[in-house]
Image (tube, helix red, strand yellow):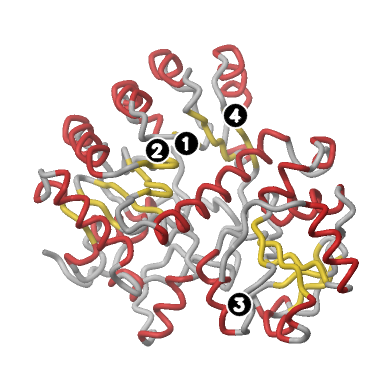
Amino acid sequence: MEIINHYSVDAIRSYKENFNADIVLYGAGNGASSYSKISLAALNSLNLKPDYFIDDDLSRAGTNLFDLEIRPPNFLAENLNKKIIFLSSNYFESIKNTLLKLGIVEHVYSSTDIIKNAPQSAFNNVMKYEEVLRRLHAHSTKLNRIQNMSLSSDKLILNAIDVQVTEKCTMKCKDCSNLMQYYEKPVNVDSRALESNIEILLQAVDAIDDVRIIGGEPFLYNELPSLFKILTQSEKVYRITVYSNATFVPKPQILKALKNKKIEVEITDYDYLSKNHNEMIEAFNENKINYITHKPQNWTDSARIVKNDKTHSQLKEMFDRCCVNDVLSLLHGRIYHCPFSANAHNLKAIESDKLDWIDLDDCKNPNELRVHLMNFYFGRDYQAACKYCLGRDFSQPKVIPALQTKNVIPLNIVNIN
């Protein structure tokens, strides 16, 4: 089955009319900046109003989203040739597997061309157009990465990598899925080691669509300017996203370093907790720094470290549906498959499994690292850390974002090595 990226809107309209086909949006995300919102707005603006949503979360079947009914995937099995499916989710592998099981191999489209053809005014009541473009970029680059690598085994394109520059944070959210609430003595990463790690990583890959600078709170890391210099000067890095909670305004030297077209700051506005949100926005506007700001979205119960006793098939399914299953994480000289694995191992909170990481100290040769990365990306059905994770997808219960804890949350240490 091919997910079609480029197509004629007129051809889609003609097929619908000639075959009385349903237009379906697969993926019913309901967050403040969900891709389903902009896909729906774009289709409506082009007179291609969808008939219903399909979503893998079976608990939502029969409910409505934006006045459209949400139906389960097996509904698509009826009249297979009379469905035009637009993907309004980034869970490409999971959706593709579901469609193949149902026997659907045609008329499956990315929403990218629909959104590109829609007038900017289509999104006026949905979200800022800059945010639309950002969501479009994330969607299209992830799909392109998957398709490029399936076409050529010689290409190594990373969709995204989280570069964690600090364990320190200015907030202590009890449900932080990156596990910052468990650190008793958080530290910054060693700057020289990190920059060396980045240099060899860039030699080993063909491209990185998004380098995501995270913490904790990354603006607590004073060596950002030298890190940004390496990343912005590399032609292999297409985009750099810095995630902040707006608790303070970055220092002048960091503000200066942020003034680059490749860099965008994504601010999560936690209301009174983001006590310098307006001041940060003012500083960014004054310095012409790219940024977006939004309220917290769809926090799930994914922050607890619990032995889950899932079977192999259940762990594989959980990993397939994980929202960060194609986002690598770099922390203290090791590349992991996700921030949960990175920090759970770093905290020594789970059983140590060396298959869950690549130690860059052991891979000084870029060609050797390239081979390791290719195998690491696609070599396993799930990570050992998945056995201690509750999952990071739509099926997890929602929690109230950014509830604070005064004290470090104690860990039940499984193994210390």
Q: Are marks 1 and 4 in contact (CB under 8 Å)?
A: no
Task: Tell me which label, 4 or 2, sits earlier in the chain.
Answer: 2
Q: Is residue 348 left or right of residue 378?
A: left
Q: Are marks 2 and 3 in contact (CB under 8 Å)?
A: no
Q: CA distance from mark 1 to mark 4?
A: 18 Å
Task: Pinpoint residue 54: horizontal percent, then vertical percent.
Answer: 72, 72
Q: Nearer the viewer, mark 1 or mark 4?
A: 1
Q: CA distance from mark 4 to mark 3?
A: 43 Å
Residue 277: which disc?
Answer: 4
The C terminus sits in image quarter: bottom left
Q: Are marks 1 and 2 in contact (CB under 8 Å)?
A: yes
Task: Tell me which label, 2 or 3, sits earlier in the chain.
Answer: 3
Task: Pinpoint residue 71: horizontal percent, then vertical percent.
Answer: 76, 77
Residue 99: which disc?
Answer: 3
Q: Quadrant of residue 283?
A: top right
The residue pinned by badge 1 equals 241
Task: Pinpoint residue 232: horizontal percent, then vertical percent.
Answer: 38, 25
Task: Pinpoint residue 145: horizontal percent, then vertical percent.
Answer: 45, 52
